Amino acid sequence: MRAISSELALQIGVSLGSLVSYFIVILLVLVILSSAIKVVREYERGVIFRLGRLIGAKGPGLFLILPMADKFIKIDLRTVAFDVPHQRVITRDNVSVDVDAAVYYRVYDPNKAVVQVENYLQATNLLAQTTLRDVLGQVELDDLLIKREELSKRVGAILDDYTDPWGIKVMTVAIKDVSMPESMLRAIAKQAEAEREKRSRIIMAEGELLAADKMAQAADRYMSSPFAIRLRELQTLTDIAREKNMVVVTSTTQIEEMARIVGMVKGVKAEEKRA
């Protein structure tokens, strides 16, 4: 009986050992599969290095790599937008301004984005800051305020040329805001006010010139027709009479006639008083 019991215990021990071995093997297989199976989304790519050498980009979807031999780097292909930090720029006419901008770009070649530059996010950000200061420092303040869209396109084109070897496509650069000192704002306001005053004076002078031309034409017309100027004079007197005032308007050639009329009126009033 003891021999049978020891043999049974030995079989049970062997069975348990086999089960443990199977479990360990299955666990190792699951660990290897979990490290070998990779999944990337539709907007992502996986760049693979095998023993230090570039294999290429894979994805989207499911693919396998060799554990311990392959290194996997995930790259996002979506458009990235980042704010360029507040930049102090001195324009060509020596005016200090603060500029805020935004850059939109995307990775079009994951292999170059990993191999050609250490950190493409940081490199693109620093390059955008430098390019923005260089381009805006070559223009005057008026051009910076008026030609903002044109300057944004110029900065974007320069950035795109620099980042193309990195596999990065710069979509656009937007200059969001240009801040100036308070003293410069007051100077610009005075300049704008002076410009408006200048335009108003020019408009008034042009109006006077046109009025003088018209009056000269009217004078020529009156000279050719004396009755017309007499009718115009009577119309003016009629307009004055509507105001019911004591103003009498006459020409120098009619002073004697007016004096006789006034004398006659005084004589009539004197006779009425005697009566």
Image: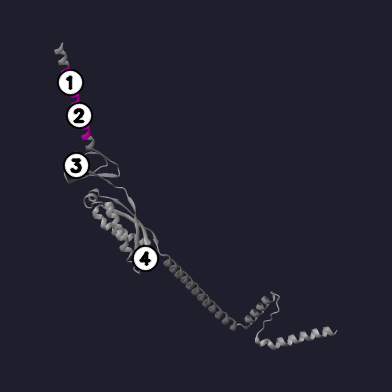
Q: For mark 1, what is the residue? A: 13
For the residues labelled 2 and 3, the Cα–Cα distance comes to 24 Å
Residue 72 coordinates in the image, percent (x, y): 22, 43
Q: Which mark is residue 96?
A: 4
Q: Earlier in the sequence, mark 2 or mark 4?
A: 2
Q: Quadrant of residue 2?
A: top left
For the residues labelled 2 and 1, the Cα–Cα distance comes to 16 Å
Q: Is residue 135 left or right of residue 200?
A: left
Q: Residue furthest right?
A: 275
Q: Nearer the viewer, mark 2 or mark 1?
A: 1
Q: Residue furthest bottom?
A: 256
Q: Earlier in the sequence, mark 2 or mark 1?
A: 1
Q: Quadrant of residue 250?
A: bottom right
Q: Nearer the viewer, mark 4 or mark 1?
A: 1
> Please, what secondary structure does the residue beneath circle 3 have?
strand
- For disc 3, the neighbor class at 10 Å (few under 14, some 14 to 19, many from 20) is some
| Nearer to the camera, 182 or 47 | 182
Q: Residue at x 39, y 61 (%)?
A: 178
Q: Earlier in the sequence, mark 1 or mark 3?
A: 1
> Please, what secondary structure does the residue beneath circle 1 have?
helix
Q: For mark 2, what is the residue? A: 24
Residue 235 coordinates in the image, percent (x, y): 66, 77
Q: Residue furthest front?
A: 2
Q: Which mark is residue 125?
A: none
Instruction: Name the kind of residue labelled 3 in the image.
Output: Asp
Residue 203 coordinates in the image, percent (x, y): 50, 73
Q: For mark 3, what is the residue? A: 70
Q: Is residue 231 above or below residue 58?
A: below
Q: Is residue 248 left or right of residue 189?
A: right
- For disc 1, the neighbor class at 10 Å (few under 14, some 14 to 19, many from 20) is few
Task: Give, as a single range, the part of the protein colored magenta.
Answer: 9-32
> Please, what secondary structure does the residue beneath circle 2 have?
helix
